[in-house]
Amino acid sequence: MSVPLLRALLDRQHSDSRPGQRDDGLRIALAIEGGGSRAAYSAGMALALDEAGLTGCFDDVYGTSGGALNGAWLLTGEAQRWIRSWAWPEVADAKVTDPRRVLRGGPVVDLGRLVHHVYESITPMDFDAILASPIGFHPIATDARSGRATDLASYVVDRPSLQTALRASSCLPLLAGRPVRLGGRTFVDGGLSEGVPFRTALDQGATHVLVLRTRRSDQRAVPPSLFERLALTPYFLRHGRSAGRAHVERHRTYAADDVLLAESSVAEVPTLVEVRPPLGSPDVSRLGADLADVEDAIERGRAVMAAFLRQLSADS
């Protein structure tokens, strides 16, 4: 008989189950939505999971864009120390996002600066711990040529390839420059094809998936504006027309995900469950730079996950 997802997590926690040494016959995945600065909400949710001692209860972590960055922090074992750095002034001062760079021929979003400067010198990310973790790490990106969601796990074999995979998953078309090359292929932001990366987890055999969302239930993805489509057309003509089609259609993908996740979360035996920012939470844009808003989003995400886990414990 199927076991509800959160019951399965608590059973693992209480039995001191260890990744790679399970005997319950389940494969439990964590899927983390991105969305640029909006991923501060999923950062707070991930933080609450780690504070509750549940990180080691997952077998795999899937993440798209900023969600992949949050997943990486979880697997370092140092999420409680560093994941709030989304809102730290010293990180903002590193100018990962800087529209003025366009005047010098550079990208608005410099992902190389993020992984090779911020994650090495300001908030050191333990890449070796991620590589050594028994919990599988699956950054999701969009293949620029086919437009399909791609799990980059098989390409991640060492520190440089892990850093490249994080860049690929977050490579916003045009804003972050050319697609990122990895394993002989080129990739752009995973949000074009699988912004909420639970379907890949299910396709790969996950029996249960907890999904951390960055949009409220009353927020809907919208089609790209005419201006956005015109601005990005030359980019996609040069780097991947199929990725361009995925960009145009991604609001439909999000809509289908919303329906499936809403239905699954209230199933009689929920094995696919989403947690969203609470209604009334402020909008945080993809390139939002107001650190007070980002910090607020982290705390709201943390609070809603903590409340979710408390309710579970009360029901149990």
Image (cartoon, rainbow, N blue to C red):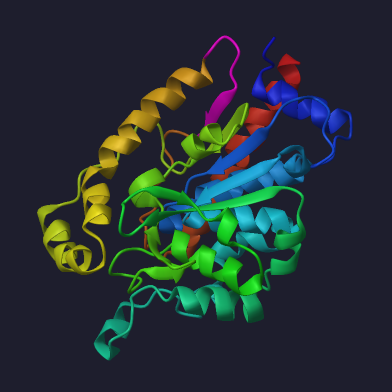
Tell which residue pokes out farthest to the bottom in this image.
Answer: 104
Q: Is residue 41 above or below residue 114?
A: above
Question: As rendered, which of 233 and 308 lies closer to the eye?
Answer: 233
> Which image quarter is the C terminus in?
top right
Left or right: 50, with 171 as reference point = right
Q: Residue at x 53, y 64 (%)?
A: 166
Left or right: 8, with 297 as reference point = right
Left or right: 197, with 176 as reference point = right
Q: Give percent across and percent down for residue 305.
A: 62, 36
> Which image quarter is the N terminus in?
top right
Tell which residue pokes out farthest to the right in this image.
Answer: 15
Q: Residue at x 65, y 65 (%)?
A: 157
Q: Give percent across and percent down for residue 32.
A: 54, 45
Q: Is residue 295 above or below residue 272?
A: below
Q: Is residue 226 above or below residue 167?
A: above
Q: Quadrant of residue 179?
A: bottom left
Q: Give percent across and percent down for residue 26.
A: 72, 27
State which region is magenta: 267-276
Examine the structure image and report whether residue 85 is included in the region drawn in magenta: no
Question: As rendered, which of 276 and 266 lies closer to the eye?
Answer: 266
Q: Main secondary structure of the magenta part?
A: loop
- Mark yes or no: residue 2 visible: yes
